[in-house]
Amino acid sequence: QKEVEQNSGPLSVPEGAIASLNCTYSDRGSQSFFWYRQYSGKSPELIMFIYSNGDKEDGRFTAQLNKASQYVSLLIRDSQPSDSATYLCAATGGGGNKLTFGTGTQLKVEL
Amino acid sequence: KAGVTQTPRYLIKTRGQQVTLSCSPISGHRSVSWYQQTPGQGLQFLFEYFSETQRNKGNFPGRFSGRQFSNSRSEMNVSTLELGDSALYLCASSFKTSGGPSYEQYFGPGTRLTVT
């Protein structure tokens, strides 16, 4: 069983819509959760991180964490074609900096 | 601030050879982590160095090793290369999140290694 799971997609949304990306994790010791965006042929780019239950907003992005359900999500409002990329969810546990990644969800924003 | 730099960006090696990859973290960051990314296995953690000491290690064979220098620059070495080592090798530079339990990790552009 993978420790961090994501639906591989592709998830297709029309321009201007809300894209909802989901992630579940199995290690209850995980403390912090990260969302990265990766364009084809590029390295991952940090979008947001969250470590407290609830919502965290940054511009068009909102991260949501529910530790009881072991669930993390990323909402992208007013989706743009430039948001088309693979979104990677990652978790860290206690001690050190090891990020455990999901396999990523491919998002396509269509005109 | 300059971002994370990695050299070389592309590398082609033959099976059995060894390779050394270099990473310079963001100025002031003392933690450097290495990851391997392949289409089949995704992003996998190799190891982390903090203040010249290995702090964490992933599940990779001993052919994969690393080190960190006093200026926080890091190198990773892969000996006796195998075809399966072909991957994008990513270095991440980290600092502690303000008020949080973890570190924010920022990735370099990566080194694309091809083993033939």
Image (cartoon, helix red, strand yellow):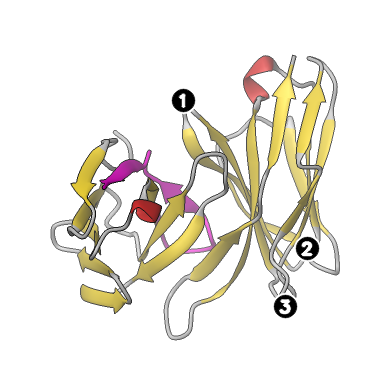
Q: Which residue is mark 2?
A: B52
Residue at x-position 27% and y-position 76%: A56
Q: Earlier in the sequence, mark 1 or mark 3?
A: 3
Residue A98 covered by magenta stretch:
yes
Q: Earlier in the sequence, mark 1 or mark 2?
A: 1
Percent position of residue B69, x then y:
85, 61
Residue behind mark 1: B40
> What chain is tagged by disc 1?
B
| Place of residue A78 in the rendered image (x, y in percent of width and height, measured from the top left) | 24, 64
Q: CA distance from mark 2 to mark 3?
A: 14 Å
Position above or below: B55 against B78: below
| Nearer mark to the viewer, of 2 and 3 | 3
State which chain disc 3 sits on: B
- Identity of the residue drawn at 79% across and 66% down: B72
Q: Quadrant of residue B82?
A: top right
Q: Amino acid at mark 2?
A: Glu
Confirm whether circles 1 and 2 share one chain.
yes
Is A42 magenta? The answer is: no
Q: x, y (%) of residue B57?
A: 60, 47
| Tag of residue B61 | none
Instruction: Specify whether B107 is left or right of A60.
Output: right
Q: Quadrant of the N terminus of chain A?
A: top left
The residue shown at (43%, 75%) is B101
**Highlighted magenta segment, given as a residue range:** A91-111
Q: Chain of mark 2?
A: B
Question: Quick check: can you spot residue B16?
Answer: yes
**Residue furthest bottom as drawn:** B99
- Residue beneath disc 3: B28
Mark 1 surroundings: few (<14), some (14-19) or many (≥20) residues within 10 A: few
Q: Position of residue B1 (x, y in %)?
A: 70, 77
Instruction: Tell me the quarter of the picture where residue B24 sits.
Output: bottom right
